[in-house]
Image (cartoon, rainbow, N blue to C red):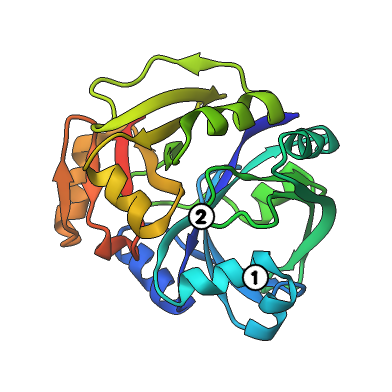
Amino acid sequence: MIERFDHAVIGIPDLEDGIAAFRRLGFDVSEGGRHPSLGTRNAIVRFGLDYLELLSVEDASKARARGPFGEDLLSFLGKSSGLIGFVLAGSHLDGPADGFRSLGVGADGPFEMDRIRPDGRRLEWRLVVPGGSPWRKPWPYLIDWTTPESDLLAWDPPGDHQCGVTGVAGMDLVTRDLGATLEIYEAALGLRHRMAPPSPGEAGTRSVYLRIGSFRLGLHEPTGDGTAGRELDRRGPGPFRLLLSSPDLSSSASTLSTLNIQFRKTPQGLDIDQDAAAGARLRIVPA
């Protein structure tokens, strides 16, 4: 059963560069740790139970040994940087895994995973990876935390973010087949709560919006030339834009200006320059 949004993954070829970029944006970034079985290393931008993961590969041979999971990550990082995947959290993940299999997508797991923090503490969880890989796909991968939520927040407390961001409000995805993608979310993941699109919606797309708690998920199939269509052509289906919430948009804009960060004001919020965000498309919206 899917219960909430967990985190978004931003692939970074050089993790130190990614950490520096997000600190320049006014985020409080902490060292995450290493995934021994994946050959990867990460850093965390924590808001609450929701967070951003900056992810890089430090042992390519270990990553390749994990098949499409590692190969797709290495392929992306070899030519790009930015949003690459996202994770929904829940429990009893055998049901969603079977749902993916019934749709012909397939799924690996649930299987055990862990990450060793710099202080030596071990985080543990169970993972479901649909389609053999979660990277640049129009679906999430799924997590069931074994480590108690109280420990997650105690060990990685929410950061004090100078830019004023307090959480993840939503995400927009691009897909080549809106109907098939929507079926995944409704039939495999059991998401039923559709919502009215924001005004104005994503230009040049057919779109459906879903709600997971306070998290808004937009599914977009491009219908012509536009930003979403160009993103689909360049990077393939998957995460397109991450929406971050701020209780005071004017204050966030002022801070970004003080930090010399390029951004654009739109009717929807503040669109941060992708180069400043290590290739990720970020929009700060009112909380």
The residue beneath circle 1 is: 70
Please state the horizontal and vertical placement of residue 212, each as a whole percent of the image.
57, 26
The span from disc 1 to disc 2 (Cα, nearest Å) is 13 Å
Earlier sequence position, callout 1 versus callout 2: 1
Please state the horizontal and vertical placement of residue 32, each as a whole percent of the image.
60, 66
- Residue type of the residue flagged with mark 1: Gly
Please state the horizontal and vertical placement of residue 1, each as a whole percent of the image.
76, 29
Figure quadrant of the C terminus: top left
Residue 7 appears left or right of 209 = right
Question: How many residues crowd around disc 1 within 10 Å: few (fewer than 14), some, or many (20 or more)?
Answer: many
- Residue type of the residue flagged with mark 2: Arg
Residue 186 appears left or right of 257 = right
Q: Is residue 216 visible?
A: no
Question: How many residues crowd around disc 2 within 10 Å: few (fewer than 14), some, or many (20 or more)?
Answer: many
Helix, strand or loop at label 2? It is loop
Please state the horizontal and vertical placement of residue 262, each as a whole percent of the image.
16, 57
Residue at the image point whose x is 38% and y is 41% from the top: 244
Residue at the image point whose x is 78% and y is 34% from the top: 102
| Nearer-the-camera pick, 217 or 20 | 217
Residue at the image point whose x is 62% and y is 56% from the top: 156
Residue 40 appears left or right of 174 = right
| Nearer-the-camera pick, 29 or 133 | 133
The residue beneath circle 2 is: 136
